[in-house]
Amino acid sequence: MRTTTGWQSLDPASNALTRVTFARRDPRPDDIAVRIDYCGVCHSDLHRIHGMLGEKDLVPGHEATGVVVAVGEAVTGFAVGDRAAIGTIVDSCGACAMCEAGQENYCHDRPTTTYGGTDRIDGTPTKGAYSREYVLREKFAFPLPDALDPAAAAPLLCAGVSVWEPMRAAGVGPGSRVAVAGLGGLGHLAVKFAAALGADVTVLSRSAAKEQDARRLGAGELLVTTDEAQAAARGRFDFILDTISAGHELSPLIEMLGLDGILCVLGNPLLTGPKLWELGAGRKKLTSSGTAGLRQTAEMLAFCAEHGITADVETLPSGEIETALDRLAAGDVRYRFVLDMSDLDQ
């Protein structure tokens, strides 16, 4: 067995994680071992640390970049020294209709998550990328394009794919009228993607404070969502991506959709849905999404390399994880924290 060092949550009432040494498996024939250099801090990490799914003793982290340090004997896609990226899932059944369609994120037998999951071979719990090394099947790792900065690219593996896949499914492209509700970790990448895809992009916000940022990211407009402004925007958009994490009403967003418009709720999928008549008035569609499959993730990384897209990040030493989580809980980040894992060598 190999060992590595990482940050583990031992108290669900606290954002203070404990530095621990723990075992990683030796690479199986189709495995690679990756030295984790950077790992993004996702809002879902915060929720799960505090027991959202009833888990304990988590090593979080599921958006990471690093360098391959070992390969199994059957590995063909990576060599020692290659740059690699790791996302939210590290295995799936490979045989169900979803897996065969390249949607491993929706595996009927449930995908194995990067942390808090169960290894499909030995039954051990998966421990995440708030650590210096990660071992996974090469199929579920991605070559990191040379054009992408490894720190700023890390959030693409969760925040990025989470907004990319529903946009692609909705056919967002030139001429699409797209609105992004909320300008945070998800929303700022959604604006960048939609603008690069050729859409006409509007940011929906409760205040004008982020208007300059919205335009810098690629939006043509920031719409302050007063009742009067919402009424004026009725029927205006083809696709609205709702990235707001706080509780809020969906009905005003649905009112802003045009005929056959789509509202995709990502920021808070536990929200109560609208009345059916609100969707029926214009054949509107309400949907959500869960990260992305392997094909879409690879496509997104190639698109980002071509268009120079990465997350806007603030990088902190991994030893400052408590500070990052405290500030994330307070909304004090523009727009994503990334941990530099090199201090785990000390």
Image: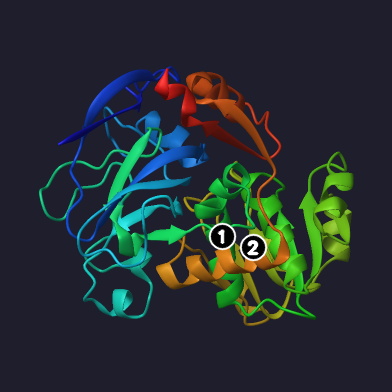
Mark 1: which amino acid?
A: Pro
Residue topped by disc 1: 145
Q: Residue at x 44, y 54 (%)?
A: 82
- Which percent across, then down, holds residue 221? 88, 58
- Which percent across, then down, holds residue 145? 56, 60
Q: Would residue 310 appear left or right of 157 to someone viewing this image?
A: right
- Which percent across, then down, holds residue 177? 78, 73
**What is the quadrant of the C terminus in the image?**
top left
Judging from the image, what secondary structure is the residue with disc 2 in?
Answer: helix
**Residue 275, visible in the rendered structure:** no
Please say if the residues under marks 1 and 2 sit with CB atoms less than 8 Å apart: yes
Q: Disc number at residue 201?
A: none
Q: Give residue 317's quadrant in the image.
A: top right
Mark 2: which amino acid?
A: Cys
Residue topped by disc 2: 304
Q: Give residue 279's quadrant in the image.
A: bottom right
Q: CA distance from mark 1 to mark 2?
A: 9 Å
